[in-house]
Image (spheres, grey):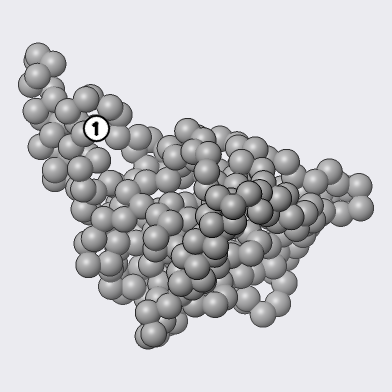
């Protein structure tokens, strides 16, 4: 098969995939999901069974790689940010890196076509690496630099109404949702602040690095910082599953941020669903 033929076949393959979210089978049994009656719930797998976690009290789990599944009502496709930290204990070093993990995404718009024409891998195989914490916060807070690793982490995906959008889109406020501190919920606030900051920079009265440095002080309480991202298809309910590695004796926080969830007013919810996890110490 010639290179031109391969490219043509890739074009057709991408066109078939464009605009469709990757839909994996939900690991939580249908009988368990049916009992939710439309409310969102986080489950953890223990001993081959799925147990619902409460967001109102700490959950204690054995350390090691642990599988979770989040079920939630959604009729449209979208993307979910999964933010996970270990809190610092007395002798822990503060985190200076952010672990970023993303499985394959089904992209939409012109992206699949361009990847096919130029024989660029679609990167459905996944993505996992680390990035400097300062670069991570700067990119998602007051983006000036565009680190290739973070640009590669984010993707164009089909959201509600099958509209294409970027997971790091600034205009929709998506980018700020990946922050662990000072997360904006109202895009009007984001737009206003960016306009004021831009004017202050032009007048020589403001250095964006000062804003990032101030924000970084709030991250010193974390010993480990990790961001994952999942794509979901609309369903009743929708479902994502992911794996976290629990460190023996660590105290952790987990936040789930649906980039496409809006209230009746059209605004993002003011709070993110969150859970506190205590990992048991190693057995003596």
Where is residue 227? Give x, y as percent. 56, 50
Q: Does 2 appear above or below 176?
A: above
* Residue depicted at 57% across the width and 75% down the height: 271
> Does dot 1 land on a helix, a strand or a loop?
helix
Q: Residue furthest right?
A: 90
Q: Nearer the viewer, residue 261 or 61?
A: 261
* Residue depicted at 54% across the width and 57% down the height: 199
Where is residue 90? Give x, y as percent. 92, 53
**Residue 25 position by quadrant:** bottom left
Where is residue 77? Give x, y as percent. 30, 63
Q: Residue furthest top?
A: 2
* Residue depicted at 22% across the width and 39% down the height: 112
**Residue 119 position by quadrant:** top left
Q: Nearer the viewer, residue 237 or 196?
A: 196
Where is residue 220? Give x, y as percent. 79, 52
* Residue depicted at 46% across the width and 65% down the height: 191
Q: Is residue 245 visible?
A: no
Q: Is residue 114 left or right of residue 131?
A: left
Q: Does 238 appear above or below 94?
A: below
Residue that badge 1 annotates: 115
Number of labels in the image equals 1
């Amino acid at each position: 098969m010639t290179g031109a033929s391969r490219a043509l076949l890739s074009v057709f393959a991408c066109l078939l995939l464009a605009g469709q979210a990757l839909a994996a089978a939900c690991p939580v049994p249908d009988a368990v999901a049916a009992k939710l009656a439309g409310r969102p719930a986080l489950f953890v797998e223990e001993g081959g069974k799925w147990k619902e976690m409460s967001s109102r009290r700490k959950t204690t789990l054995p350390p090691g790689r642990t599988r979770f599944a989040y079920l939630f009502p959604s009729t449209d496709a979208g993307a979910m940010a999964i933010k996970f930290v270990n809190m610092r204990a007395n002798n822990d070093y503060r985190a200076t890196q952010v672990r970023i993990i993303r499985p394959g995404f089904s992209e939409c718009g012109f992206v699949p076509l361009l990847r096919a024409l130029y024989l660029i891998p679609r990167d459905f195989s996944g993505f996992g690496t680390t990035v400097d914490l300062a670069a991570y916060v700067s990119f998602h807070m007051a983006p000036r630099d565009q680190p290739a690793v973070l640009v590669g982490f984010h993707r164009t995906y089909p959201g509600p109404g099958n509209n294409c959008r970027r997971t790091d889109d600034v205009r929709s406020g998506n980018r700020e949702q990946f922050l662990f501190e000072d997360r904006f919920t109202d895009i009007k606030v984001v737009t206003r602040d960016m306009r004021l900051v831009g004017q202050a920079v032009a007048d020589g009265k403001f250095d964006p690095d000062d804003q990032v440095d101030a924000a970084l002080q709030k991250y010193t309480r974390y010993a480990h910082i990790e961001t994952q991202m999942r794509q979901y298809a609309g369903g009743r309910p929708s479902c994502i599953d992911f794996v976290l590695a629990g460190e023996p004796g660590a105290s952790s926080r987990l936040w789930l941020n649906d980039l496409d969830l809006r209230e009746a007013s059209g605004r993002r919810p003011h709070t993110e669903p969150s859970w506190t996890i205590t990992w048991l110490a190693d057995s003596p």
